[in-house]
Image (cartoon, coloured by chain):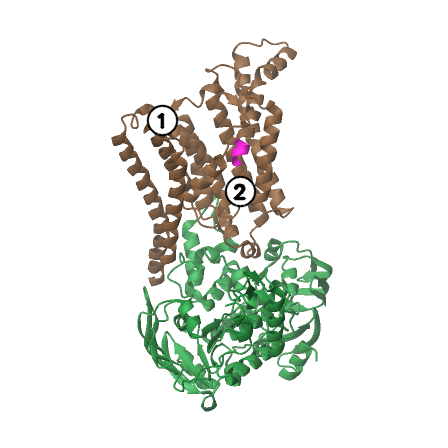
């Protein structure tokens, strides 16, 4: 009985540290919001808040994916390139919808307009989105293959695919952007601007990705395995964990998140453009680190990177509203990373 | 700094005219939040003596080393160096005084040469450029003088752990050290290397260096030390001349209870054969044919690197074998990966806790439950209550000293970390338990607990393969003892068959 009680108190203390970091980050974000709402009139406007939610969403999703990888002491430098490349892929697939559906209907001798055609177009577009996510999964599996089978360091492997995918994207588009057809009111093109229950649709995507990620990481055995692989892969392996399988899983998840961001970009900008999301991999890594993830692996959470991403988005948004030179946000981000990691390290050393 | 390093090399501790105790502790005390790591201790180290310190894990030995080497600040009390009170608050200050330590785990640069490691931080230069050849020559001279047959220009990582330890010792010896602390130096050494190390220690003593020697192996203490101090629960409980004491008294001081028998051995009736290997060969071992029955402890004895661990990890599916056959309960089986072995009912507690056994920066509970998470899963998510129960059960059954299952594994002492490695397999359950060096760096009390546990496993119908480089352990416990040398079995003995000398001779192969 006594063991029970001491155990529980310590358990909550251990969790308390994570919660503490989470609260610090929320506190920081709220402080920024309060300061900005006093400093500018525009900040608290509905338009700006929903704009902020949209801006932060894409980096947040990249950061969630990146967190899976960093928890195993790996890194994925390709997420920005994957997002750019998949925006091209989804644009090509969506633009082919009328041709494909029309072709099918004509062959069957049916009308290419009307209710049936619209339904088929909707199904086709959904298929286009899923296929694009599949492209992301394939990229991730290729990363894991290079790391597990060819023995390449994650840094090198993903640096290489970052180059390859940018190149492939530019070759496909002849270094221009692909306009997504169907006009501003098509289901695909209007998604990013839409709201649902008063919340921007892009932020809903964060929720839809965030909750399963939280469950996977903190409430399932695969989550435990991810932490174990990050802490000591040999010990995990000797305990019966399929460590290679875990590596395949996390890189596939990370690249799938990146492909999702590529799709979000495409619906927001109505173009597929291989040059998009340049440098976003670094913003994603920064969000992850600000969110309390250790680059040495096995330390981190699913919600930390989301908070990190929205703190960075708030800084960028605030700098813009205050008419600061845009380059200041880079400097602020850098200083923030140093401070947060330093204080986090201090706290851990004290224990 | 430039050439002085070369000159001072191999002539340590030339001064030392002071004739009182070289180092005295007055009411030295260390508290961490929540624990009283070292209770006020008074102790005087005589100049030029070899002073052993023994005690269970967590008794305060490492705290004492940290205080003496300036790694952690003391809470109160005085440290008196050659009659003068000293601050000793940084490692640098300790080295300046001539206090140095050789740690159990070698802390050097594996990709640099032996010579570069010996002179690290004290390189010989001319006009800012390194004098490579001079340093290699000087380092070679040091090694030759010390009687180590090792090349000075070899990359450090190409050496065995034991050899690296000898290099670390040589390095400390060349730095004008007057007070040298050894922390469990022989844990990873072969007998020959240990003999070389002892020779070096005696040589340093002859040169007037004071040695503090920390070890779990009492026979080493009697072989080497002039005096021995015993720590228990952070308290210095006594100092004896080794000539005037014996093992029984020291053990009595260490654990505060008379331990009539450390090696707890119960003879069981053997059941059916669990595992049989037929001429199994692979990387590092060849032609190994052994069998393990239920209720039996099969001991594998040999020097480090004799192929025992390679053999068992291969049986466990970690490394493939090249030829031969594995039979499980009489039927041929193929074990391709660790899961296959686990599903048959084989558990492996690996050689190195740190590298293979534990996820050190993760909670104790996660480590204990790692093999059974599949069982703790309901539908898709984890059963949190079951997770807590499984971990707490093992923590209380094995009396693992931890602040709770949420504590990081690295916050536990070595013996308790070892218990976690064992706990995770008790949790999982198995028919054949393989324990690879289960008592390295583990204190006497925990050792006895582990041996009792082995007996319990046997009583429940399991079989055990026990690997140890410590002969008394396998000698006293194994029902069948196989001696390994250079990857092959060179001798097999029934319980207590053959003398220590005979078995040792087989292992060394003289």
Q: Quadrant of residue B186?
A: bottom right
Which chain: brown?
A: A
Secondary structure of residue under mark 2: helix
| Nearest the eye: B383 or A123 | A123
> Could you tell me which secondary element the residue under label 1 belongs to?
helix
Q: Nearer the viewer, mark 2 or mark 1?
A: 1
Q: Name the residue tied to disc 1.
A: A50
Q: Residue at x 35, y 44 (%)?
A: A22
Q: Colour of chain B?
A: green
Labelled disc at residue A250: 2
User: Which labelled disc corresponds to residue A11?
Assistant: none
**Left or right of B144 on screen, residue A335:** left
The image quadrant of residue B137 is bottom right
Q: 10 Å neighbourhood of mark 1: few (<14), some, or many (≥20)?
A: many
Give the magenta range: A79-83
Q: Chain of mark 2?
A: A
């Amino acid at each position: 009985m006594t063991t029970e009680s001491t155990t529980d108190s310590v358990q909550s203390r251990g969790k308390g540290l994570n919660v503490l970091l989470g609260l610090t980050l929320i506190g920081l974000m709220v402080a920024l919001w309060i300061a900005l709402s006093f400093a500018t009139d525009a900040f608290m406007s509905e338009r700006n808040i929903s704009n902020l939610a949209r801006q932060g969403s894409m980096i947040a999703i990249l950061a969630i994916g990146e967190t899976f990888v960093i928890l195993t002491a790996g890194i994925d430098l390709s997420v920005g390139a994957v997002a750019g490349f998949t925006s091209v892929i989804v644009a090509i697939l969506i633009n082919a919808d009328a041709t494909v559906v029309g072709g099918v209907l004509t062959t069957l001798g049916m009308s290419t307009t009307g209710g049936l055609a619209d339904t088929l177009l909707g199904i086709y577009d959904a298929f286009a989105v899923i296929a694009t996510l599949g492209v992301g999964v394939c990229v991730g599996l290729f990363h894991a293959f290079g790391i597990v089978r060819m023995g390449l360091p994650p840094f090198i492997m993903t640096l290489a695919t970052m180059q390859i995918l940018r190149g492939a994207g530019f070759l496909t588009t002849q270094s221009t952007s692909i306009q997504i057809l169907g006009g501003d009111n098509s289901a695909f093109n209007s998604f990013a601007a839409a709201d649902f229950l008063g919340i921007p649709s892009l932020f809903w995507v964060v929720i839809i990705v965030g909750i399963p990620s939280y469950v996977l990481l903190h409430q399932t055995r695969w989550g435990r395995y991810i932490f174990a692989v990050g802490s000591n892969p040999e010990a995990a392996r000797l305990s019966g964990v399929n460590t290679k399988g875990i590596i395949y899983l996390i890189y596939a998840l990370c690249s799938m998140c990146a492909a999702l961001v590529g799709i979000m970009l495409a619906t927001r900008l109505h173009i597929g453009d291989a040059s998009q999301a340049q440098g976003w991999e670094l913003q994603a890594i920064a969000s992850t680190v600000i969110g309390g993830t250790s680059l040495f692996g096995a330390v981190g959470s699913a919600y930390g990177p989301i908070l990190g991403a929205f703190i960075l988005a708030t800084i960028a948004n605030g700098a813009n509203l205050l008419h600061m030179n845009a380059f200041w946000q880079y400097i602020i981000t850098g200083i923030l990373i140093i401070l947060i990691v330093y204080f986090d390290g201090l706290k851990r050393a004290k224990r | 700094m430039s050439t002085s390093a070369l000159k001072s090399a191999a002539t340590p501790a030339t001064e030392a005219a002071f004739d009182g105790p070289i180092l005295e502790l007055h009411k030295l005390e260390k508290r961490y939040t929540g624990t009283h790591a070292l209770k006020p201790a008074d102790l005087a180290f005589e100049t030029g003596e070899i002073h052993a310190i023994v005690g269970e894990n967590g008794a305060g030995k490492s705290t004492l080393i940290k205080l003496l080497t300036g790694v952690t600040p003391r809470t109160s009390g005085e440290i008196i160096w050659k009659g003068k009170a000293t601050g000793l608050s940084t490692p640098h200050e300790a080295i300046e005084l001539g206090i140095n330590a050789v740690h159990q785990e070698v802390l050097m640069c594996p990709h640099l040469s032996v010579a570069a490691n010996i002179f690290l931080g004290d390189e010989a230069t001319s006009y800012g450029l390194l004098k490579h050849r001079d340093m290699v020559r000087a380092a070679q001279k040091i090694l030759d003088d010390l009687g180590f047959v090792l090349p000075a220009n070899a990359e450090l990582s190409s050496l065995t752990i034991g050899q690296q330890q000898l290099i670390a010792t040589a390095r400390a010896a060349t730095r004008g050290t007057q007070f040298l602390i050894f922390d469990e130096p022989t844990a990873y050494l072969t007998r020959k290397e240990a003999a070389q190390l002892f020779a070096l220690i005696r040589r340093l003593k002859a040169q007037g260096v004071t040695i503090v020697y920390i070890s779990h192996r009492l026979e080493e203490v009697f072989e080497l030390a002039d005096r021995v101090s015993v720590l228990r629960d952070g308290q210095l409980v006594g100092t004896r001349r080794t000539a005037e004491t014996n093992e029984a008294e020291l053990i009595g001081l260490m654990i505060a209870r008379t331990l009539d028998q450390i090696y707890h051995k119960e003879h069981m009736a053997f059941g059916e054969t669990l595992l049989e290997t037929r001429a199994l060969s692979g990387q590092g071992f060849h032609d190994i044919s052994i069998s393990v029955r239920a209720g039996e402890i099969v001991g594998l004895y040999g020097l480090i690197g004799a192929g025992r661990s390679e053999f068992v990890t291969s049986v466990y599916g970690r490394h493939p074998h090249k030829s031969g056959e594995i039979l499980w309960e009489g039927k041929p089986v193929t074990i391709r990966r660790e899961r296959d072995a686990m599903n048959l009912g084989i558990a492996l507690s690996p050689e190195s806790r740190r590298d293979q056994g534990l996820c050190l920066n993760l909670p104790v509970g996660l480590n204990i439950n790692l093999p059974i998470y599949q069982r703790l899963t309901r539908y898709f998510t984890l059963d949190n209550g079951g997770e807590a129960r499984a971990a707490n059960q093992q923590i209380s059954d094995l009396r693992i000293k931890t602040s709770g299952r949420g504590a990081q594994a690295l916050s536990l002492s070595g013996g308790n970390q070892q218990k976690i490695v064992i706990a995770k397999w008790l949790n999982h359950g198995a028919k054949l338990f393989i324990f690879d060096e289960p008592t390295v760096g583990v204190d006497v009390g925990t050792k006895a607990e582990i041996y009792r546990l082995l007996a319990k496993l046997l009583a429940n119908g399991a079989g055990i393969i026990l690997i140890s480089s410590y002969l008394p352990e396998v000698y006293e416990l194994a029902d069948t003892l196989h001696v390994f040398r250079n990857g092959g079995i060179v001798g097999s003995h029934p319980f207590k068959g053959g003398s220590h000398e005979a078995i040792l001779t087989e292992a060394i192969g003289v």
